[in-house]
Amino acid sequence: MTEKFPTKEHLKKKQDYKDIPLAGKITNAGSSLLNKTGSWRAFRPIHDKEKCINCMICYSFCPEEAILVEDGKVVGVNLDYCKGCGICAKECPVKAYAMKEESEFRKE
């Protein structure tokens, strides 16, 4: 039997680097929701609702499905999961995203 990793119980425990599988593989579907990756982002996408034409290209290209959509309209970015890769900004045909350095948003 293959062990499903990571489990919710495992994620609650303090982990050592030796406890994490090589390449941090996700073996059970949907477990990526347990791994918030936004904390290591270097750039943050800023969505301009005025420029946005709701074409959903950003939503289609986002590897983390971090683009928030309500009633067929882009309403923002889920920063818990956004890695700051900038694909949304690169693919947007009307340049409705600006990539800002994450350091601009940190409180000193």
Image: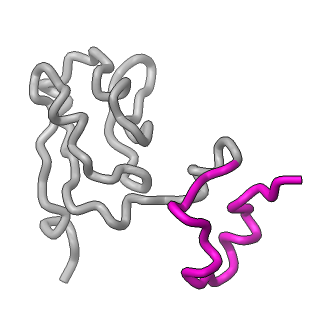
Residue shown at 82% from the left, 54% from the top:
2
Whether 24 is drawn above or below 51: the answer is below
Residue 52: where, in percent of width, then height? 19, 23
Residue 5: where, in percent of width, then height? 71, 60
71 on left or right of 28:
left
Front in this rendered view, residue 4 or 23: 23
Using the rendered view, name the quadrant where residue 3 is placed.
Answer: bottom right
Residue 85: where, in percent of width, then height? 25, 47
Residue shown at 29% from the left, 61% from the top:
41
Residue shown at 68% from the left, 74% from the top:
12
Residue shown at 10% from the left, 21% from the top:
94
Front in this rendered view, residue 29 or 108: 29
Residue 86: where, in percent of width, then height? 21, 43
Q: Which residues are magenta?
A: 1-27
Can residue 61 be found in the magenta stretch? no
58 on left or right of 22:
left
For the C terminus, the image quarter is: bottom left
